[in-house]
Image (cartoon, rainbow, N blue to C red):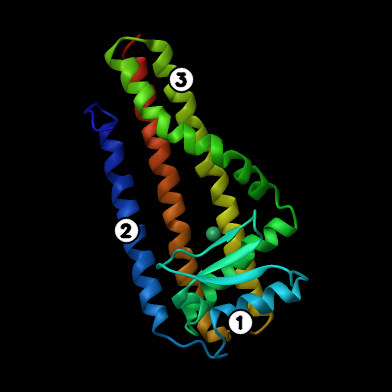
Amino acid sequence: MFFYDPTFMLLIPVMILAFYAQSKVKGNYQKYLKVRNNSGKTGEEVARYILDKNNLNDIAILPIDGTLSDHYDPQKRELHLSNDVFYGDSISSVSIAAHETGHALQHSKKYLPLILRNQIVPVASFGSSAAFPLFLVGLFFGMPFLMDLGIIFFSAALIFHLVTLPVEFDASHRALVELKDSFLIENNQMKGARAVLNAAALTYIAATLMALVQLIRLLVLRGSRD
Ligand SMILES: [Zn+2]
């Protein structure tokens, strides 16, 4: 949405934050990818340890291509770790591996925000791709109904971002507790683990704020057409 209106100014700080968060994620990830964790365990070993300790022996851990492509697949109940995380014994590797096991723990414990998020995914992904076309067609052809529909669809995308926040924060919290309590990394290396995971959390905050600002802009544009 690149129309100029008074709310355009709101986009600038949010874009700066998003850019800052992205570079922080990459920077911290690369920095701590070079630091070997003092347990010498790989990401895969740490993930296996945490899963087994929580009676999740049946969850498979598989290496996948890509950088920061790590995720937990709730349908297949599989942990997919990127090669640097799976095979690596760095602070970044074990922190991200532990974060992904955090999602598997949420799933097994039926953590409400995760369940909600999984149910919202199809609606939100359809909503976010349909929202702008609907709104723009409504705007240019003077059809308020379509603009309202676009706003409703975009709200679904914002709800998805909002529900993602507790899911991601909680997964990182569980990761840090597991790493600390099981002595998977020593205290003097916890700072690095926190830096890697907090930077990732910041990207989710930036994405949520971006969606919020976009929605405000749609509402302002809609209001000016009454
Ligand atoms: Zn996550």
Using the numbered discs, state the Cα–Cα distance from disc 3 to disc 1 in whole angstroms. Answer: 48 Å
Going by the numbered disc 2, the residue's amino acid type is Tyr
Q: Are marks 2 and 3 in contact (CB under 8 Å)?
A: no
Residue 106 quadrant: bottom right
Q: Quadrant of residue 23?
A: bottom left
Q: Residues within 10 Å of mark 3 (few under 14, many from 20)?
A: some
- Judged from this view, the residue extending furthest toward the left is 4
Question: Taking 46 as reference, is 169 above or below it?
Answer: above
User: SS of the residue at dot 2?
Assistant: helix
The residue wearing badge 3 is 149
- Dot placed on the residue nearer the N-terminal end, 3 or 1: 1
Q: Amino acid at mark 3?
A: Leu
Q: Residue at x 61, y 46 (%)?
A: 118
- In the image, which disc is placed on residue 3? none
- Asked whether 107 or 74 is in front, the reply is 74
Q: CA distance from mark 2 to mark 1?
A: 32 Å
* Image: 117 above or below 77: above
- Residue 113's spot in the image, x, y percent? 65, 47
Give the Cα distance between marks 2 and 3: 33 Å
Q: Mark 1 is on which residue type?
A: Glu
For residue 45, the mark is 1
Q: Nearer the viewer, mark 2 or mark 3?
A: 3
Reading the image, the residue beneath label 2 is 20
Residue neighbourhood size for the residue with mark 2, other residues' Cα within 10 Å, grouped as few (<14), some (14–19), many (≥20): some
Query: Can you tell me whether the CB of the residue at mark 1 lies under 8 Å from the nearest atom of ligand 1?
Result: no
Q: Is residue 192 visible?
A: no
Q: Which image quarter holds the N terminus?
A: top left
